[in-house]
Amino acid sequence: MAGNSFGKIFKITTFGESHGDAIGGVIDGCPAGISIDFKAINAEIQRRKPGQSAIVTQRKEEDEVKFLSGIFEGNTTGTPIGFIIENTNQKSKDYSHIKDLYRPSHADYTYDKKYGIRDYRGGGRSSARETACRVVAGAIAKQLIKEIKINAFVSSVGDIFIDKPYQALDFTKTESNLVRCPDAKSAQKMEELIRETRKNGDTVGGTITCVLENVPAGLGEPVFDKLHAELGKAMLSINAVKGFEYGSGFCGAKMKGSEHNDLFNPDGSTKTNLSGGVQGGISNGMDIYFRVAFKPVATIMQKQETIDNKGKKVIAEGKGRHDPCVVPRAVPIVEAMAALVIADFWLLNKVSKAN
């Protein structure tokens, strides 16, 4: 199976399935001598773990990270960093009823057609449980690029949106509620919607906005490896993501050039930032901000018509423990993937300047 690695210099390869013994990863290319804050890594993984609140899946996993290599006396050695996270609360029997059928909007059908075999327990390799490995790698990447601040937050759930620009928000309040929305009024409405949706056996989607501050100018490449293109790839690789826009995004398509152009200040900064911190595929020193759209979770507690692996029409009904809305738990995943992209380009820039 290809496609298990991400990055060029700072590279993460993940392994494992949702209901296997463990998931894990290997981080290659991390420079030696980085002092690792294990508490910070644990804090990030706890933000993503299941069972953390009443509005997420109730699967109980402690998600303790065990490092196997690449770290000695609290510092990176420059060698591959190997780690595992044991799966301790699998309930594989919850999935026995879907062994021979394809759930609507899941990877069941496509996975079976590609490989001719599938691990139906929780989606196997296609499960979002794999993203825990990305969060570990992203937490280490954050420690490599300490000067750069990365803040993601839930900006909408269903049709409930924050009606303020990110500059007016206090990111320290993101963790003050179950939804991870820094606007208290919006957060309350979002939580109510998620609870009501769960009560009806349904799910709801939403968006996450991410803001990168203190990114130095000059990261990225001008053609195929544009900074925003790599950020887009990173975000679209996350389970359930259906859309990505940065800067003015689709709203910019409605504007005229005279409205959209970011005029320069004498120091090279710009009066506005509709470019989203990236011009010509390269960071310009302004804030990089983007928005990621997540679909409603495909598993719903309602009966739906589908087909089995013989093409026969059957009825599928969700069972087990699932998120009614994935966006609150996806916030640290978005931050992690952004950190991996920026760390990789930061290292690429160092190599380029050295040559």
Image (tube, rainbow, N blue to C red):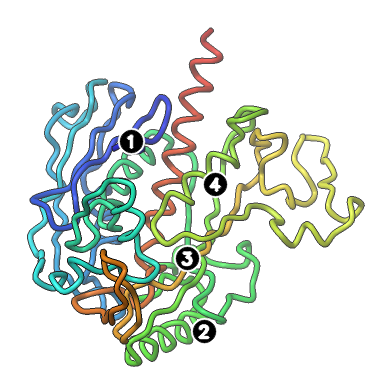
What's under tag 3, amino acid-wise?
Phe
Q: Are marks 4 and 3 in contact (CB under 8 Å)?
A: no
What's under tag 1, amino acid-wise?
Ala
What's under tag 4, amino acid-wise?
Gly
Q: What's the mark number on residue 232?
A: 4
Identified at 39% across, 41% down, the residue is: 142
Question: Does label 4 or label 2 sit earlier along the sequence?
Answer: 2
Q: Secondary structure at mark 1?
A: loop
Left or right: 287, with 279 as reference point: left
Q: Secondary structure at mark 3?
A: strand
Residue on which the image places disc 3: 294
Identified at 54% across, 47% down, the residue is: 232
Image coordinates of residue 30 in percent, x first then y, are: 32, 26
> How far apart in space, not on screen, are marks 2 and 3 (Cα)?
21 Å
Q: Is residue 142 above or below residue 313?
A: above
What's under tag 2, amino acid-wise?
Lys
Q: What's the mark number on residue 2?
A: 1
